Each structure stands twice: as C-alpha cells, then as structure tokens.
Amino acid sequence: NAGVTQTPKFQVLKTGQSMTLQCAQDMNHEYMSWYRQDPGMGLRLIHYSVGAGITDQGEVPNGYNVSRSTTEDFPLRLLSAAPSQTSVYFCASSYGQGTETQYFGPGTRLLVL
Amino acid sequence: GQSLEQPSEVTAVEGAIVQINCTYQTSGFYGLSWYQQHDGGAPTFLSYNGLDGLEETGRFSSFLSRSDSYGYLLLQELQMKDSASYFCAVRDSNYQLIWGAGTKLIIKP
C-alpha cells in the first residue's frame, strides 16, 4: 500500500493563477479531507468528503474547490491563488468520519507570489 | 469560539518523562486525539481518549478529564527521536477535528 499520496511536493504560483493539488489513497477509505497548516498553527480543515460524490466545507473553504468522483481521489483546486494561500497543504483519509486514526499524505508546500 | 490551548514549547532530557497539557473549549466534544509531527513531515496519529481516564500505548500515555476540559500526553523514557511537535485535537459537535497550535518538544542529551 502506498497509503496517502500527494502531488506536487512543492509549487510556486503567481497571484491569480489556478492549480490543482492531487490526493489519492489506496486504503479504500470513505472519509477524506484537506487541511492547511501555517507556521506556528495547527491544522485547519478546508474541505472534506464522507464518500464518493459527497463533499462539504470545513473551517476555511474560501478560495478552494473540491470534488470526489471516486473513492480513491480527492483533488483540491485553487481558483485564483492569493499570497494568503501560501501554506503547507495536507490531505488525510480514514475509514469513516468518526474514525480517530487519520492517515496523512506527505504534504504540498505552496508559495504564492 | 472554539479553542485548544497547549504550551508552545517544552524542553526535557533524554531518558526523562515529559507531560504536554491541553485544555479545550469547543462546541461539543467527541474525543481528544494526539498527533506527532516531525519537522517537514506529516502528522501521525498517537492516541485517542473518548472517555475519562488514562490510555497507554507503549512509552506514550494520554489522559482525559471531560469535567475539566483537560487532557495530557505523557511521554516516558524520552529518546532523541521523540523530538517533534505534538498536537492535541478535539472532535466537535460538527464531528470535525479542531487542532491546537502544537507543542514543540526539545530533547537534550
């Protein structure tokens, strides 16, 4: 099992550009989520999905879109990048929304100039 | 608002015991979790407390008191590889995880 994979590892964008952060898991987990982590802060939930075809907003959803067409994949789209979106993005998955053990991907480090 | 408070930094000596505290104020409570994160790495799950009391997993233990909105992570026989940041996280009434800002554990030989 590869677990949770994320691409790219690093990305530099200019303000106004759009991009998609990829996330995939091979553990047949129903629940997937996206977090951002800023220096000196904990993780903040952006969007989550409890299964294919179902997504919902987390704490900080503005400027981001998600979709879940398959159980395995949960891409995060930045519509028009802003410097405030400079952060480290983590994708996580678990068997269910209430399952305490979440498995995290290695993260994507994004710099928006 | 919702908040979790934990010390920003704790220093301990190799082989010693260290306790990292976490107090929380959230809308609803469905359990307290602890995660470890090494510099540049991803968070990894350590432990979970849904009910009051102590949970032990090897050198790590976690405690919860729901009446005090308080929990702690206890690390015994500290090793240099335990140098990392430790996060507490509470599942709130929306069933989402609310995270603390993390405690950087520095271990000295």
Image (tube, helix red, strand yellow):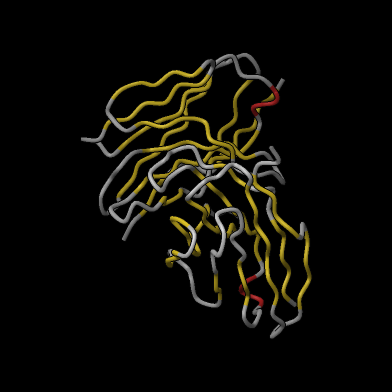
User: Where on the picture, by quarter, is residue B41?
Assistant: top right
Horizontal relation, residue B43 to residue B73: left or right = right
Q: Quadrant of the C terminus of chain B?
A: top right
Relative to A14, is B27 above or below? Answer: above
The outermost residue toward the bottom is A16
Percent from the top left, x then y, of residue A64? 56, 74
Percent from the top left, x then y, of residue B45? 53, 35
Residue at x-position 62% and y-position 40%: B37
Relative to B10, is A90 above or below? Answer: below
User: Where on the picture, by quarter, is residue A28?
Assistant: top right
Q: Quadrant of the N terminus of chain B?
A: bottom left
Relative to A93, is A18 above or below? Answer: below
The outermost residue toward the left is B67
Percent from the top left, x then y, of residue B84? 64, 35
Q: Of residues B19 and B35, which is closer to you in this image?
A: B35
Relative to A92, is B31 above or below? Answer: above
User: Where on the picture, by quarter, is residue A14?
Assistant: bottom right
Residue at x-position 32% and y-position 30%: B64
Percent from the top left, x then y, of residue B71? 36, 33
Residue at x-position 66% and y-position 19%: B79
Residue at x-position 36% and y-position 47%: B91
Tell how many labels: 0
